[in-house]
Amino acid sequence: MTAAVLGIAALPVPAQAAAVDVVAAVRRLEAQGSPVKIFQHTSVAWPRDPRVDELPRGYCKGGSSDPHVTGMARLGPGGVVAADMKRSMLWDNCSLQFLREDAAGGDRRAGDLARVGLAAHRVRSVGAVLYGAGPAYGGTSWAKIGKAPGGAALYGDQIIDAFDLGTLKALVASASSSRPGSAVHDADDRAVKKTWSYRGTTTFGKLFAMSKSFRTMLGGRLDPRFGAITVFWGIATDLTGKPIVVQAVWRPGKGYAAESVAVATRFSWDVKASITAPRTRRTARDPYGDDVADLFRP
């Protein structure tokens, strides 16, 4: 896979260029308890449903099955300690129809996916608890979902946790490329012209071994069928080492719940954030499909 696939153009390395230390920068951000703004886009290639061929041409309309995530997070000891996210994904009329048909036949996962794609929903992780609001969680008011790490609301579409120092160190140590990069854009779509680019590959199996966040996303268990899936990753920083864009691409192919996934998470650092636990009067379960990682859980 070329650098263009990850959207990071490779540039010649000047002889005087000094490598950026992203690990030291993230360690510093965590010590400062830095807040960060997030914009994230995920492209998902869903398997084609043969029922589409039974419908009139042009019948399937509307929607966008690519999840968008916006919100705020705060760093602290160990990585992300709190996050407040809004996730949007709207099914087209055909996908929603098929999911509802499958749900009526007893497929609980299809029912969950249908609700996830009805409207935007909110998730917030703070104080070791995950909260949710929206159709995916049974209503517009906040509900308590259960115990969860501070980054639970942020991760799940993005599987690369660049704020877990152990994961970050392992990725940087195995990077196939570490060099000056091209301009990237932060969560506010502002250009950061001088950057440093890390790129490399890993697998689901290796990522599961190195990343506590990824293990949490998969429910603590890696399906043996998925261990060899290759993940192409990229981290672009400013010249102080602060992450600006984290990207991951994996393409398992046909026969999987998602045939390919490409996710890019952008960060802005000049922000303020106060993330507190919402008031709740009800509970809800964590539905299938509110994160892309759910598609690869056992």
Image (cartoon, grey):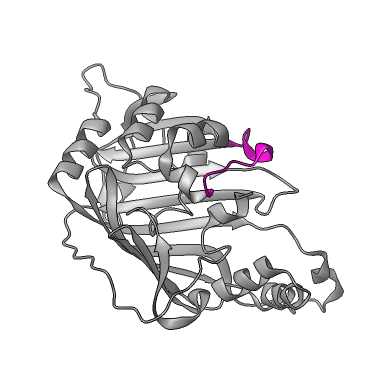
Residue 11 visible to an observer of this rendering: no
User: x%, y% of residue 234?
Assistant: 42, 37
Spot the residue most to the left: 32
User: x%, y% of residue 283?
Assistant: 44, 75
In the displayed structure image, the side of residue 120 where residue 59 appears, left or right: right
What is the span of residues highlighted in magenta in the rendered image? 218-230
User: x%, y% of residue 262?
Assistant: 53, 49
Q: Choose between 247 and 71: the one closer to the eye.
A: 71
In the displayed structure image, the side of residue 36 where residue 70 appears, left or right: right
In the displayed structure image, the side of residue 282 where residue 48 appears, left or right: right
Quarter-wise, where is residue 250 in the image?
top right
Which residue corresponds to the image point at 41% horizontal and 80% vertical from the top-left? 282
Which residue corresponds to the image point at 39% horizontal and 51% vertical from the top-left? 265
Is residue 234 found inside the magenta-colored segment of the image? no
Which residue corresponds to the image point at 42% horizontal and 53% vertical from the top-left? 155
Which residue corresponds to the image point at 46% horizontal and 48% vertical from the top-left? 216
The quadrant of the picture occupied by the N terminus is: top right
Examine the residues drawn in magenta and state their main secondary structure: loop
In the displayed structure image, the side of residue 83 where residue 201 appears, left or right: right
Q: Choose between 18 and 191: the one closer to the eye.
A: 18
Residue 251 visible to an observer of this rendering: yes
User: x%, y% of residue 55?
Assistant: 82, 77
